[in-house]
Structures are given as structure tokens and as C-alpha cells.
Amino acid sequence: VARGYLRRPQWTAERFVPSPLHAQPGWRLYRTGDRVRFLSDGRLDFLGRADHQVKLRGYRIELGEIEAALMRSPAVRDCIVLAPEDRSGDRSLVAYVVATPGSQPEAEALRVFLMQTLPQYMVPSRFVFPESLPLTPTGKVDRQALAELDLLQDEPAERYVAPRDDVERRLAGIWEEVLGRPFIDVRAHFFHLGGHSLLAVQLMARIRREFGKDL
């Protein structure tokens, strides 16, 4: 595993830490990022990844649980789930799904599939469908590269339905500003685009100011 850290001093310093178990200087331990606990018989119980757990609107979520649920779909060959921050510092779940050859999974179908086994707060609000998952020199999934992928559309572009009149254009503009993403489909679901109750309050206030109507 150490080969991937060659000539990468920042990664090396982060992962190869001074050992508190040795009196002699120079000894190092490798920080794996795994969370474990000792059992009474001395065995280690694997609890998950420390760096893949997030707290989202009061819920502590293990991203690996969502990935495992997605992998049970025959349409999914590989996947990674992240919780990136938007421009306002808010987080939402984004699933990056590599389709099984011959399959064309859709975001809504995967949401319905996940809701059979996961609570609503663990269902990703957005889905991105790359052809493959980018890898780091160590052979692990490059999560930073994934986070930089285009998140604007989780459905094929030809299915996008634009606003059809002035009211819909003004409403779409409000949604785009509140949600921080352009080209809102008029059929889109607010909560599937990363919306939540706090943003919904902002949305209603903006609509009230724009149209003079109380919702």
C-alpha cells in the first residue's frame, strides 16, 4: 500500500504517523481509517470507515450502508456515495453509480429501490452516472475527482423539460437560486434536488415576495 505514497509528502505525513508503541524514534504506524473495537476475547470488531461517516441534518449516516444497498440492485455494477457541501455549506447525499453493462438505471427507480430497505434520510437526493469510477495512484476510488463531476443533471439531457410560461420561468429561477443549481426541470422534486425543510422555508419566502402569494 505504501507505493502510492511515494513523493507525496502530505499524504505520507497524514497516514504514516509516529508510533507511540516504540521508544526508538523513526517507528511509524499506518492510519487505515478503519473503525474497530476490541472484544473481550481480544478479537477486533470492524465498525466501518471513520472517514466515510457523515452527520446530515441530525442523523449520523454510514455511507457504506447506502453503497451496500445500492449494490444489491442488478442494474448497479459499482457505486460510491458522498455528502459534498454546496455553496451555502449545506450537505446532501450524492450517489455515483456505474451501470451494469446493458442496463440504464434511472435516478427515480433507484430511489424507489433504496426506500425498500433504507429510511428516507439515507436515500441520496442526487444520482450521477459516470462510465467508471476514477482511481487514485493507490488504486482507491478518487473521491475528490468524483466530487468535481457535473452534478447538474441526474437524468439524460433529452428528458429535461424547460419552463413553459412566465410563471414557471420565475418559479424555476427561485428554485435555481435556493438550491444552487441551474436548469431545473419543471417536474423536479424539491427534496430530490437536495432540498430540505430549512431551504423550503426560504423557497416559500422568496415565492411570497415574488408573487405576493402565501403558500
Image: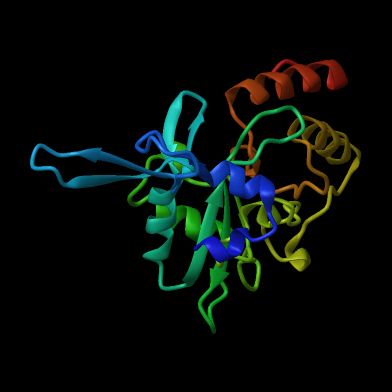
Let me know if residue 180 appears in the view. yes
Let me know if residue 106 appears in the view. no
Q: Position of residue 198 (x, y in %)?
A: 62, 21
Residue 212 shown left or right of residue 19 in the figure: right
- Indicate the quadrant where residue 20 lies: top left
From this view, report whether residue 77 is shown above or below residue 154: below
Residue at horizontal 46%, vertical 36%?
121
Residue at horizontal 77%, vertical 68%?
158
Farthest-out residue, front: 24
Q: Position of residue 79 (x, y in %)?
A: 51, 62
Residue at horizontal 37%, vertical 38%?
22
Residue 101 shown left or right of residue 88 in the figure: left
Q: Position of residue 84 (x, y in %)?
A: 64, 41
Q: Considering the image in quadrants, where does the C terminus appear?
A: top right
- Indicate the quadrant where residue 170 lies: top right
Q: How many marks?
A: 0
- Indicate the quadrant where residue 73 lies: bottom left
Q: Position of residue 59 (x, y in %)?
A: 43, 28
Farthest-out residue, left: 41
Residue at horizontal 65%, vertical 43%?
193
Residue 125 shown left or right of residue 47 in the figure: right
